Amino acid sequence: MPADSARTADRSIVQPDNRDALLRNLVEDSAVATVVAKADGEIIYANRAFERLLGYKPGECMGLGWDQYIHPDYVPGVKARAARLVAGEGAPVQSEQRCLRKDGSALWVLGKPAVLFVAGRPLCFTMQALDIDDRKRAEMSLAANESRWRSALQDAGLGAWEYDYRTHRGFLSTTWREMRGLPGDAPVVEGLADWLARIHPGDVERVKAETAKIVEGRSKVSVIEYRERHAAGHWMWVMSRGHVVEHMPDGTAARLVGVDIDITERKNAEEQLQFVNTLLTTQLETSPDAILVVDAAGSIISFNRRFVDMWSVPAKLVADKADAAMLAYVTSHMKDRAGFVERVKYLYAHPEEEGREEIETRDGRIIDRYSGALRMPTGEYLGRVWYFRDVTDRKRADAQILHSARYDGLTGVANRAVFLESIRKAAAAAAVEGVRFAVLYLDLDQFKDVNDTLGHLVGDELLKAVAERLRANVRESDIVARFGGDEFAIMAPDAGDEVRAARLADKIIRALASSYMVAGNDIRSGVSVGIALFDPALPDPETILSRADLALYRAKAEGPGVYRFFTPAMESDTRTRVRLSTELRNAIGTDQIYLVYQPQIEIESGRIVGVEALVRWRHPTQGILSPTVFVPVAERSGLIAALGHWVLREACRQAKAWADAGLDLEVMAVNLSTVQFKRAFELETGIVAILTETALPPDKLELELTETVLMAATRDHSDVLQRLRGRGVRVAIDDFGVGYSSLDYLRRFPVDRIKVAQEFVGRIANEPGSAAIVRASIGLARELGVTLVAEGVETREQLDLLRSWGCREAQGFYFAEPLSAEFLTPLLGRSRPPPGIPRAGSAA
């Protein structure tokens, strides 16, 4: 805790430091003799003017008492006035008194003491002393001889004046004029009103009242301090001392004489001191810390309001400032009372030490406590300052941040960093103790369906329930973690062989297969599990986790609710995918990647109404690769965006080339992958740019999306499809019937065509169920007012059935295999291409 306001408030009065620069500038170099003393009169500071005034060398005044620098005749009076001021009785009064020089001689000074209070307790005295020895001697001489009096005042440099109420004229000494910046012969006073006009408006009434007292005979002597306008335009402070030397018959003043002193410098110094004191007091009270100041004996000197509020100090303790009672009261709040008191006593017994520690209160607060010594410039120990700051909220926030950095914010289980740390520790222990462990990587089945159909809030609640089941079905020594989304992991120290690991995986699968009741929804969501056992040859946590991930990839490929162990063959498959990914990256944009086109036929006329663009890879060593081989690689490696963009651009370019050649083609259909569709904004901008570049009319382009892709769509994706359709781009549902049972996407995404999956079309001749699905799909398309294309037509019998059910368009090997643009171009000009185009024309 920083040592700030309170310590500064006390030390800034008794010692110069970095924050006393302003005080030193105002006092140390001031021509006004200034001294600071303790309540018993011991000098603790004297500026150079004071030392010169009493004839001391620098520093010699330190430690002098009243008996050593006040004339014996005045010591009793000084002590009595000091006692009254300390008791708060009356205000400081300016007085004339005699001081003792170092050589024992006496001199007259004019001084006014001031008491510095901290939190209502007197800390020290300050006094500015003005050398009036010459003036006093002059005044005494004046009583014997008026001419000598005037001459003495002039020589003393005091502004002597005289005013006769009978003639309303007066005398003003040269010094009086000089201190006001007035010419020596200029008329100045033409009456009382003229003098009052020169006085500051804020002081006029007070000056008039004091003047009336002496003029009316109610006082023989007056001492007035006021502000008067200097000839240069600024305000100067004047102390004017006058007394009556002649009276009128009625007792009123006939003639006044007096002297004026320019006290501007002293007043400025006082104001600066008051400002500093106010500033430090304000800092003390506005500090964020609760502050308590005690003296060397442990007695309370002061405390701020925040201290009272922090400890709910009773009013009586505040008023009494009873240190023992205050310590006992504050101690009563502590959780460890004995430790608190012991530490306080230790610091009191070791004034050279600072102390900082956190203490806990009975009501659960955490308080940062700091204590530092309060010392004189000489190093003398004056007391101790205690600072208390409530850091409960910060501590809780730090704890929350630490928890958030290590645990999943949604489910409360460990995060990836903690999980890897646990694997690292388990691997280190296994290397010493020879105990193996297992890592299980889990992925929920159909979790995305829950998010898409019931919303993310329900999905989050499901994840919480899954985490609870996982914790309930593992041992206390097992670590459960969530990596984000629906991916979880378990590190099981006691399941280091296949039997125990399989038993745990089976237990987890069965536990998560039971239904969940979430927000009124009965939900079933199984889990797939990949397992990697610790291998001493590969103790790296990331490697172990990666192996479990590979095993999970295989488990998900084989079906829901399956667990699989990692095998070296999986790494081989991964290396193959990585190699293929690198080769694909280099192939995109070269002649290795090309398109073929499968015609879409109008059944009644036999006319080619559209084509579906299909991508192929002419691999330099593996021959022609189907998209089922390399598109998943592109999706996993992030190459799908580049590949998809190339396919769209090339398909649109070819469609525009056919249109420019006068060949009638209604639509160019292009498939979109799930990953492409997830990047909705990028997809939209890419399509718009390609249509602009190729100048293909938007209604010639058809985007084919599977039901799975549409069901994964968010509102942003929906907006993108709507904007593209608004431009004229067509949308078709591919593989209709094999996806989700919900048809809500047909309402959310109005489409132009439905493409019935070939796995149904291929069985319509001998499987009633497939025939029923196809007939129902044709009827649904008719009701929705959209076109239906039957995919996978391979026989005349299938074509005749489709025609009889009202299907208007078909696609399949019965008409043509996917063809290169070169072989397809001649067919586009025919009104009815022959069925079964020879394989010689095939490019795939």
Image (spheres, grey):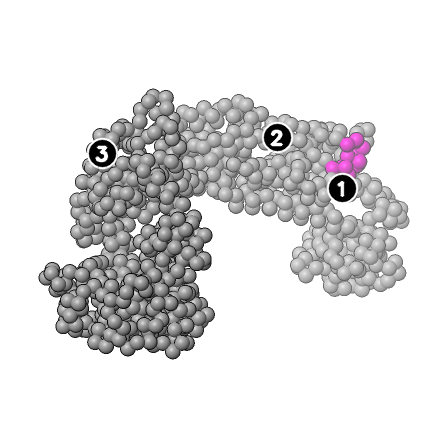
In screen coordinates, is 374 left or right of 333? right
Residue marked by disc 2: 375
Q: Is residue 133 above or below residue 786?
A: above
* Position of residue 572 measured from the top left corner of the image (x, y, whole percent): 35, 39
How many numbered marks appear? 3
Residue marked by disc 3: 502
* Mark 1 or 3, closer to the camera: 3
Q: Quadrant of residue 843?
A: bottom left
764 or 553, nearer to the observer = 764
In screen coordinates, is 54 left or right of 560? right
55 or 783, nearer to the observer = 783
Q: Which residues are magenta?
A: 47-58
**Kind of element beneath mark 3:** helix
Give the CA distance from mark 1 to mark 3: 89 Å
Mark 1 or mark 2: which comes first in sequence? Answer: 1
User: Which residue is depicted at the point 15% across and 67% down?
Assistant: 797
**Kind of element beneath mark 1:** loop
Q: Quadrant of residue 670?
A: bottom left
Q: Quadrant of the C terminus?
A: bottom left
Give the CA distance from mark 1 to mark 2: 24 Å
* Mark 3 or 2, closer to the camera: 3
Label 1 crowd bin: few (<14), some (14–19), many (20+), radius 10 Å:
few
Q: Mark 1: which amino acid?
A: Asp
Q: Mark 2: which amino acid?
A: Arg
* Position of residue 710 measured from the top left corner of the image (x, y, whole percent): 28, 61
Label 2 crowd bin: few (<14), some (14–19), many (20+), radius 10 Å:
some
Q: Quadrant of residue 492?
A: top left
Res. 29 mark: 1
Task: State whether residue 631 appears in this view.
Answer: no
Mark 3 or mark 2: which comes first in sequence? Answer: 2
Q: Mark 3: which amino acid?
A: Ala
Mark 1 or mark 3: which comes first in sequence? Answer: 1
